[in-house]
Image (cartoon, grey):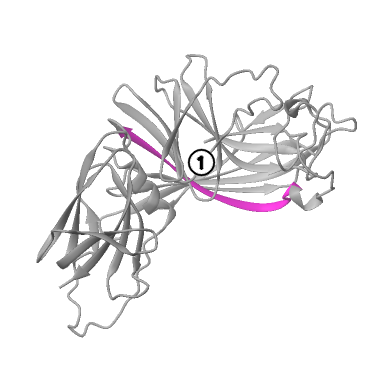
Amino acid sequence: NRLEDTEDVGDEYDYGPAPESCTVTSDGACGTVRLVEQGNLAGSLAASLEVEYVLKLPAAIAPGREKRSEELVDCSARTRVRLTHGSPVVEVEQTFDNRASDHRLRAEFPTGVATDTLVSDGHFYLNRRPIDQPTGEGWVQPPTGTCSQQGFSLVEGGDRGLAVLNRGLPEIQATRDGARKPVLSLTLLRAVGWLSRDDFGTRRRSNAGPTLHTPEAQCHGEHRFRYAVVPFAGDCLAAGVPSLSDRFRVRLLAKQGVEDGHVVGGEGLLATTTGPASVTAVKRHDVRDTLVVRLVNLADRETEETLSFGREVRSAWRVDLLEERLEEIAAVESRSLPIALRPHEITTLEIEFA
């Protein structure tokens, strides 16, 4: 979770470094470390360490936009790292008081994994992109180095890997350290003052939109970022990284009710029990008193996923996106439903309970 801060002379579309670049990191920053939550058998099942320190950053880009200014401002930072009993997820809550302008703040994670590929969560798909990008010589817009993501990005190789999960942080970059091993850099904050500009080289000095001054895009003030790290063995699908990411992003909401014996507790509605498939939607049918479940096979091979239910299933159908029935699946008076999925297939099911 090393913080890395570099100037940004770009705009709201693209990052741009200055001709005289200057990077500030949290290395050697003095601060305090304290235990804010301690797990024990009689109480909490989690423990947290909190670190507070100050980053001294250049106040803004200097006139001429060639380098950062000499004036420094104090930006307080607080990092809370949390471990929970029985969970492989290392949760991070990063607070940062941004008093600087024209810069990009990122959190870095060395991985120690031998690979040439960055894997990122996409739309019903795991995007696999090369870590070493082309130079883009002669391109209208050369590659920026960064990649888009939804819930997570990871590297894997040699039967191990490291994933970085996030909540609402859509940009990541994989670079290489001195040993040629990937370092994942998660963008936390980009502070810029213009919707679009045409005076930085990484976009061939071309405009992407109107040149409008947008001072609030400097994002001054306190920000709180939530993300997590997951080391895993084997490949990411076998390790359940997509499921861990879903559970990290969308917390289980629990509410104390009144026990009247009407509903038996202790059982879940549904669960996937085999295969690399991921549940992307669960809803009630718009017309019928049935359940709609959408699945995607994230692997590039055929698989059979088994859905297990907390209630008896009377009937099941494959349906289209309009929830119209296509074909019936044999599943009468059973609590499990095997579903064959082709590589990368998205399928929607309608479930009728007994």
**What x and y, as percent, mark residue 22?**
73, 26
Q: For the residue marked with disc 1, what is the amino acid? A: Gln
Task: Give residue 175's quadrant in the image.
Answer: top right
Q: Residue furthest left?
A: 333
Looking at the picture, tell me which residue is in the foreground, 83 or 64.
64
SS type, badge 1: loop
Q: Main secondary structure of the magenta part?
A: strand
| Image position of 286 (left or right of 56) | left
Task: Give residue 115's quadrant in the image.
Answer: top left
**What x and y, as percent, mark residue 221?**
71, 53
At x 84% / y 47%, what residue is drawn?
Answer: 212
Q: Which residues are magenta?
A: 218-232
Image mark count:
1
Looking at the picture, tell me which residue is in the foreground, 5 or 13.
13
**What x and y, as percent, mark residue 101?**
77, 42
Q: Is residue 201 above or below residue 283?
A: above
Q: Residue furthest bottom?
A: 260
Looking at the picture, tell me which residue is in the foreground, 43 or 205.
205
Q: Is residue 87 above or below residue 301?
A: below
